[in-house]
Amino acid sequence: MKNYDKLISDLVPKKFGKLGVIWTSSLLVIIIIGIVAYIDQLIKGQVVTNMRDYALWGIYISNFVFFVATSFVGSVTVAILRLTHNEWRTPIVRIAEIITLAAIVMAGITIMIDMARPDRLLNLFIHARLQSPITWDVIIIPTSIAISFLLLYFPLIPDLAILKDHFKDESPFLSKWYGKLSLNWTGSKAQKAIQTKSIQIIALMIIPISLILQTVDAWLFSTTYRIGWDSTNMGAYFISGAFVAGIGALITVIYVVRRVYKLENYITEFHFDKLGKLLVLACLTYLYFNINEYLIPVFTAKKGELEHLDVLFTGHYAFLFWFVIIGGLIIPSIVLLFKKGRKPLPMFIIGLVVVIASWWKRYLIVTPTLLHPFMPIQGVPESWHHYFPSIHEWLITLATLAMALLIITMLVRYLPVIPIQKTADEQELLKNVKNTKS
Amino acid sequence: MKNQLNIRHFFLVLLSVFCISSNFAQKTKKSKVRLKAQYVKIMNGEIYFDIKASSKVKKKNVDVANIEIAVYNEFDDEKVKIGKTVTNMKGESRFVIKNRNSIKADSTNIYEISFSFKGNDTYKKAKKSISFKDASIEAKLITKDSINYITATLLDKSTGNPISDESLDVQVKRLFKPLKIGEEFNNTDENGTILVLIEEGIPGVDGNLTFEVVLNDNDDFGTVKAIVKAPIGVPIVDESTYDQRTMWSPRNKTPLFLLIFPNILIVGIWGLIIYLIANLFKITKS
């Protein structure tokens, strides 16, 4: 019982310290600046962006693709590790679920930012054509948001009941809210049966839904004839890329949460070791698809595509391209092969680099292709030949990233980042097993 | 009294300022209008004049729209107005002569038609005259040794004599520009005749081809066009997918598999989501 109390006091959400407050305030400032820029964009139109006739998708869409990719982490850690009986996943699943929800919600918001006229959002439903990948996207994103929410919520219910009791004296206001959200959870057999069954259904559902989400995202590009997008490799390429982005984000957030909440006893080096191996697998898989995506066209590409490849390999985007491939995939794979590389701090640095590289990777997927249309770019201002985001685009995009981090921060602040009930159950189980063996 | 004088002076000054300014306004420079006209005769069809009005304003050529142009037939010192026409937004107008007999040639069998614009606030008056003789083209399709040819004879209608050494264009009517066939120049021989080979395999709707034999913008005879229709083309098979359910058709023609399969998925997944939400209520109540 003493152990149980310690477990609860270790894992219940705690007030932020000074750093936490500075962090949250900084995010709020970035968001407010972004909202001001967005209002200006609404008033003046997308002329404030650097998107023009050719680069008609820019940083907003690449940011959207990044969010969609990052949301894949929930499916990987919760569902796949669950189905493959990887029990070590328990301390990391809640954070994965939180990242998934934050990322997919922000993906939905980002696509509205790109629309320029959000008041016309309803038209996407009213005039939907099922032949259009945009319609598929419009359907799958709300579906993913719904399932990601349920993925987070169902396993959380017993913990909310624990929090209700825990905060009864300390903070009656919080306790009241935890009580409402815990849905009168008593831990009865009937409740447990419904919860277990629901979690099983979600775990099974989230895999095809995530695969559909990533694939639809890939098909937005590959159903066109555009150079660099017209590829049958795209679906698998996007899924493996999402695998990398998601695990990278998970490692980064876990490291920070572990340090801030002092959870070294729960999220151990063992977990980082496992996550490191998972990231190597993800990086190597994605590298394989990158080779397919870029090496084969070197042999088979026609003039237009060769020019596109030249721009990536040795031209304007070469630095970013090689940073993504070498810094974001090859070096992490090599470093993580060594046990020392899979220690928390190196893992955090690698995770951060992988996430940054993943973000730029989406930029490289979207922009260079748009600047290589089939017809030569002519009769337009010189600036239309190039694309680099405007200050408005940067501010709004940074605000969306900050908003995703704020959602994560708020959920981490008010929810237990490690499932309390499940950890308690598992520790109990462990004891029983030890007792049986002895 | 003095006051009345002052008021009178004031009105006089005002009136003179108004008169000077209105006079100045009237003298603002008007632009010249350039008229172009082309006579076109379709054998067994209509006769018309294509008129184009343009002007140079600020060193730029602009089309002169919505101006009225009067059309006159001049012969033997007589000038008869035969109608009027108004230019469209491109500065173009087509004046059709419904009855050939409504215009007369002079004693030398030359028709003289003039086009006159009487000017307006913006443009000066303008005039353009064209003269032409009446010519005809008799064209027909002939087949020799299973090979098709177009033969055509160009005649001066006033004398009935063949016109030799004039180039005739032979072309097949297409959706946009006509497709020229034969040599680059098909000059008429001493009998005013040309013979042009028709290559096989020219596509046409239901195999029907429309050939045009054209004397193009000739100095003496204007433009004369004869039309020959012949079912000797390769029938075009209509490959339109307009009525089919395709990936590029509107939403009411969505392919059935795309209606059935995704909708099953959507209903299935959302059914489960609703079931899961219902489970939340069940947890509350159990």
Image: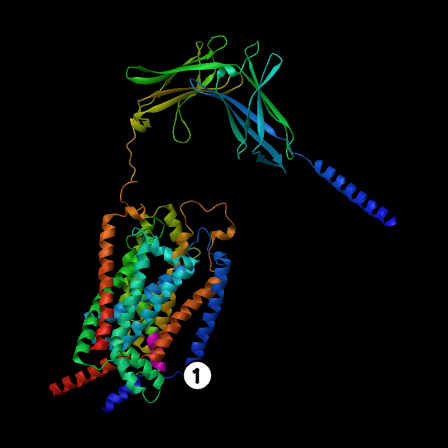
Task: Write down the chain letter for disc 1.
Answer: A
In the rendered structure, does residue A394 fall within the stretch colored magenta?
no
Q: Position of residue B184 (x, y in %)?
A: 43, 22
In x, y percent, where is residue B205? 32, 28
According to the picture, the residue beneath numbered tag 1 turns out to be A18
Residue A55 coordinates in the image, percent (x, y): 44, 53
Q: Amino acid at mark 1?
A: Lys
Name the one closer to the observer, A366 or B80: B80
Instruction: Give the residue at x 37% y 76%.
Output: A410
Q: Where A35 falls versus A426 (above or below)?
A: above
Magenta-drawn segment:
A253-260
Residue A119 location, quadrant: bottom left
Out of A211 and A297, give the one closest to the viewer. Answer: A211
**Total numbered circles:** 1
* Colour scheme of the picture: rainbow
Tell me where residue B59 sits by quadrant. top right
Residue extending farthest bottom: A2
Q: Image quadrant for the N terminus of chain A?
A: bottom left
| Residue A254 shown in magenta | yes
| Outermost residue to the right | B2
